[in-house]
Amino acid sequence: MPDPTKVSDASVIPRVGVAVFVFNEKGHILLGKRTGSHGSGTLALPGGHLELHESFQECAFREVLEETGIELDPSTSEAQPWSGISFVTAVNSVHMRDHGETQTSSSSPPLGRHYVTIFMKARATLRPGQETVQALVTEPEKCLGWVWVPWSYLRAMSVSQSSIEEMKRRAESEGNRLPVGLEKLLRAERLAEAMSVTGDRDDLKRERRVGVAHDGLGPLDDEEAVAWAQADEFAQGSPLFQPLVNFLVQNPHLGPGLN
């Protein structure tokens, strides 16, 4: 019989996780701040480990309900059970380390962790009497909170994070070290962007005005600008969870509906 401690260790054997793009009534995506486990301090989609004999759709439905209290809309029919919870793609993240870990960190496995992440997408069910979908913090030991973000925000975050991480790698290859961490660099970039857009420190709460393009993604409408500001306030410089960054970098062709 295999050693259960080794079977559950992603530094010993590849683990399979399921991450879910949950869309609300506005088409925004649910993002949470992880804590107390692998990926602590990063922003990630709801999800978790695939259990024995479980389908991707069943895992997605179970994990989202357990973590947020949200029921996904499966659009079940005899012909297409679970058709409303659909597969997007899989991402193979090898030699993966938690944010802030290095190869020489005492808590970090020498070769990192190996995760295969199954990305799914589904719409949240709007409960009777609700005008907006509400995400609850049902597992505070795993997640500090939730925020709804536009697709444009996720895409821009991945671009910023990837460029900063590449700058960090180049500096280290030349024997240099950045004077501050990734969180401070991300926060500084957001602040600089906001100031360049508004041109006024007293107007930073507005963050990004209507019609301002970002990273080639086109202008933000008023609703998106407000959502970006709320997401920045929630994130406070926290980076994206590495499998999510890998997904966004490897699939630049995908649009807001993940099609």
Image (spheres, rainbow, N blue to C red):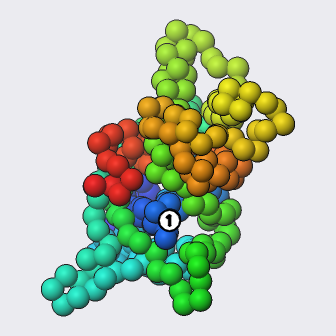
Query: Outermost residue toward the right?
Result: 202
**Residue depicted at x 36% and y 65%:** 121
Frontmost residue, 68 versus 133: 133
Q: Is residue 34 above or below residue 213?
A: below
Q: Where's residue 145, x and y in %?
A: 66, 63
Query: Outermost residue toward the top?
Result: 174
The image shows a total of numbered marks equal to 1
Q: For mark 1, does the 10 Å Cα neighbourhood hold few (<14), some (14 to 19), or many (20 or more) residues?
A: few
Residue tagged 1: 26
Q: Where's residue 182, x and y in %?
A: 63, 32
Q: Is residue 147 left or right of residue 66?
A: right
Q: Is residue 132 above or below residue 118?
A: below
Frontmost residue, 104 versus 53: 53
**Residue depicted at x 23% and y 83%:** 81
Q: Is residue 168 left or right of residue 206?
A: left
**Residue depicted at x 52% and y 9%:** 174
